[in-house]
Amino acid sequence: METMSPANSEASGISPEFAQHLIASQSALYAFIASLMGGVSEANDVLQETNLKLCNKASEYDPAQPFLRWAYVFARFEVMAWRKKQSRSRIVLDDELVALIASDWEGTSADSTQQISALEGCLDKLPPQQRDLLDARYGRGEAVQDIAARQCRTENAMSALFYRVRKSLADCIELALRRETYE
């Protein structure tokens, strides 16, 4: 099966912009579907069915609206169709619970995007030495003890420094999100 790319999307009648939205949303759609299905292995199958429906309905998409919100509707219906097929052989979530999870997810998805954007902006404002320390600890998973030894500091001093940097980031993110809310 040929994979979707913005370059080959026009041959199938799908605009390159739509193809880019679809490609960029795959991980978010998968996470949404898996959360509605309880993380079952068939989430990939439901994602593919959702992608087919989205491609078939591409002409109905309004680019002025958020793509993910539109795609989540199709994903939710595909999960419900999967649940009906599976209802005889497994215990599955009921429709009300699926609707509740879906509405919670839709609200947090936009929030997550804003939070990630705020985090990236705040990380850019950190001095390079602090960014390097965060990368060592959280990016590469190095132990505080190892980082402290390399920096010629005690483990307690290094832990205190990490606390101050995390607190500074949290304050920066909170301020950035508040500014975004009022703009």
Image: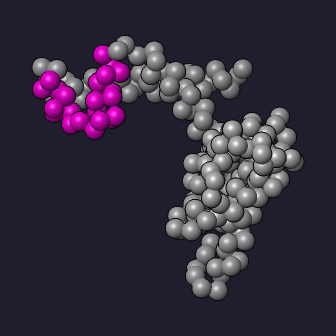
**Residue at the spot 87% in from the left edge and 48% down from the top edge:** 60
Most foreground residue, 171 or 91:
91
Left or right of residue 154: residue 7: right
Image quadrant where residue 153 sits = top left
Task: Characterize the magenta stretch by its predominant secondary structure.
Answer: helix
Residue 116 coordinates in the image, percent (x, y) = 54, 32
49 in relation to 153, above or below: below
Task: Indicate whether residue 31 is drawn in magenta.
Answer: no
Q: Tell me the quarter of the image containing the C terminus.
A: top right
Give the left or right position of residue 91, taking residue 103 as reference: left
- Residue ranking furthest to the bottom: 88
- Which residue is located at x 65 percent, y 43 percent? 5
Identify whether 8 is placed above or below 46.
Answer: above
**Residue shown at 26%/26% (left/top)?**
160
What residue sits 69% from the left and 38% below the top? 7
Q: How many marks?
A: 0
The segment highlighted magenta reads 129-150
User: 148 above or below 16?
Assistant: above
Q: Which residue is at the far right? A: 60
Asked if residue 28 is positioned above or below residue 86 in the image, the reply reads above
| Camera sees residue 173 | no
Task: Evaluate whether residue 125 shows in this view.
Answer: yes
**Magenta span includes 142:** yes
